């Protein structure tokens, strides 16, 4: 009887232990900045439901396909830790440019099932390619001179295009975009610098001409005033002489 009780207790304990293990293996945890999709490793299927952060019961043999929902950065530059090298593109007048740019984006949690079923595990590679193509396409809408005179306008246009097309094509939301710098062919850049120098020379010459014109006009006005003053003095002296002669004549007439 005692032996039977021991056997029953062992079976119950073993069953409880197995149950605890199975339940533990059926739970999975998503961190605060993560969402996930329930993926079955047995049947290779995925559930169309977005799981938020916390402890989730997803079943034995299941795991999460995880997506971070905090801001992530894509950087195109010469830096060693950049996502990709600088973007090679062309302007509307055919000049080749190397653009240094970066953007910050986040995954739209409600669309992660679409992202997984469309791109699988190649989400980031495809997103990088889409972003690169959009920036290159937008660059062709502006001339080489625009990249010097309308840099802010170009940045705004690129951000708008990225926000619209990245969301519609890949279900990611672009929050910020920075057009950081650009690199031109040496010959063109030297010509731009020469043009800037010539422009400064023209501006200086124009300013000097304006100053000389003001100086000349001032001298003309001073000369006019001097002439008027001389004429008035001459008239005054002439009238004085006439009056004095008349007075003398009158005096002589009285004496006679």
Image (cartoon, rainbow, N blue to C red):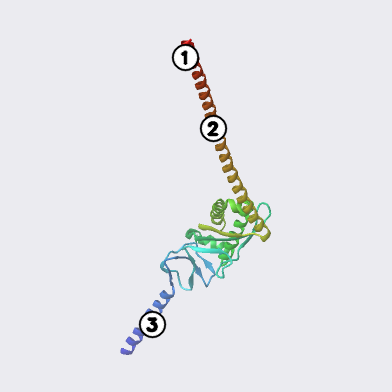
Residue 236 x, y percent position in the rendering: 50, 24
Q: Is mark 2 on a helix, strand or loop?
A: helix
Residue sitting at x 48%, y 71%: 62
Horizontal arrangement in the rendering, residue 52 relative to residue 139 (left or right): left
Above or below, comparing residue 241 to residue 156 in the picture: above
Pointers 2 and 3 in contact (C-beta within 8 Å): no
| Residue designated by label 2 | 226
Q: Which residue lies furthest to the left in this view?
A: 2
Above or below, comparing residue 185 to residue 31 in the picture: above
Pointers 3 and 1 in contact (C-beta within 8 Å): no
Q: Which of 98 and 204 is in front in this view?
A: 204
Residue sitting at x 55%, y 37%: 218
Quadrant where the N terminus sits is: bottom left
Residue 179 x, y percent position in the rendering: 55, 58
Residues under labels 3 and 1: Cα distance? 157 Å
| Residue designated by label 3 | 14
Q: Which of 201 and 190 is in front in this view?
A: 201
Question: Which circle's residue, 2 or 1, is located before the other in the chain?
Answer: 2
Horizontal arrangement in the rendering, residue 173 relative to residue 8 (left or right): right
| Residue designated by label 1 | 251
């Amino acid at each position: 009887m005692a032996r039977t009780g021991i056997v029953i207790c062992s079976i119950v304990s073993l069953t409880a232990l197995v149950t605890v293990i199975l339940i533990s293996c059926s739970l999975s945890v998503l961190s605060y900045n993560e969402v996930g999709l329930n993926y079955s490793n047995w049947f290779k299927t995925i559930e169309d439901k977005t799981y938020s952060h916390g402890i989730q019961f997803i079943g034995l043999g299941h795991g999460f396909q995880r997506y971070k929902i905090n801001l992530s950065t894509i950087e195109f530059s010469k830096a060693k830790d950049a996502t990709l090298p600088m973007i090679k593109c062309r302007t509307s007048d055919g000049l080749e440019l190397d653009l240094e740019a970066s953007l910050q984006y986040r995954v739209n949690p409600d669309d992660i099932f679409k992202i997984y079923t469309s791109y699988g595990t190649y989400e980031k590679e495809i997103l990088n390619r889409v972003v690169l193509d959009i920036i290159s396409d937008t660059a062709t809408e502006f001339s080489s001179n625009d990249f010097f005179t309308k840099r802010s306008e170009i940045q705004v246009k690129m951000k708008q295009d990225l926000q619209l097309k990245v969301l519609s094509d890949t279900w990611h939301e672009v929050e910020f975009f920075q057009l950081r710098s650009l690199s031109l062919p040496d010959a063109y850049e030297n010509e731009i610098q020469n043009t800037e120098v010539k422009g400064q020379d023209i501006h200086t010459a124009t300013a000097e001409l304006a100053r000389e014109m003001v100086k000349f006009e001032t001298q003309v006005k001073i000369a006019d005033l001097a002439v008027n003053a001389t004429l008035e003095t001459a008239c005054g002296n002439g009238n004085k002489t006439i009056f004095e002669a008349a007075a003398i004549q009158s005096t002589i007439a009285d004496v006679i």
